[in-house]
Image (spheres, grey):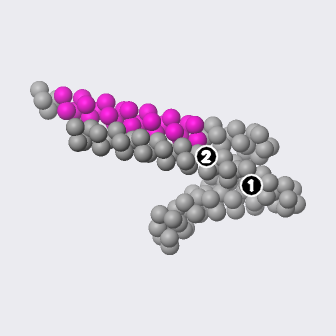
Amino acid sequence: SANFNNIIVLVKIIVILLIIALLAETIDFALLMAGAAKFWLSKRMVWTSIVCAFIGAMLLTPVLLGLGTVAGVFLGGFAGMLMVELIRRHRLKPVFRSSRSAILGRSAGILLKGFSALVMIAIALSNVYS
């Protein structure tokens, strides 16, 4: 009976953590899309930014470890957006303006995810040590 209660508590904690993670991802995506709509970023630019951010993180993580992941996400996303905008507009000033705004939106999403991770760690540790 005690073992069964532990399993029920464990499942509840996992569901709560999953909900927090999904909520953080949804809000991050909504921030990204809101920034895209506000600064007239195309869907192609947003998706290219996401893909290039992933590629940048994969390339820089082995070199710089944790710092490489963060730097890769920012630099990869920026490079992807810069590339799409240069192809689309052929002028640099609007490209840098839209890329900068997208980086700010991405930063807000990363801060939100970091805060969510801290909340999830606190929940997990409080249940481990209670």
Q: CA distance from mark 1 to mark 2?
A: 14 Å
Residue at position x 78%, y 44% in the image: 39
Classified by dominant secondary structure, the portion drawn in magenta counts as: helix
The image position of residue 108, as x and y in percent, is 61, 46
Tag nearer the camera, 1 or 2: 2
| Residue assigned mark 2 | 108
Asked if the magenta segment contains residue 3, the reply would be: no
Q: Secondary structure at mark 1?
A: helix
Q: Which mark is residue 128?
A: none
Stretch in magenta: 5-28
| Residue assigned mark 1 | 99
- Asked if the residue under mark 2 is in contact with the one under mark 1, i.e. CB atoms within 8 Å, the reply is no
The image position of residue 110, as x and y in percent, is 56, 49
Q: How many marks?
A: 2
Q: Quadrant of the N terminus?
A: top left
Q: Is residue 86 visible?
A: yes
Q: Is residue 99 left or right of residue 125?
A: right
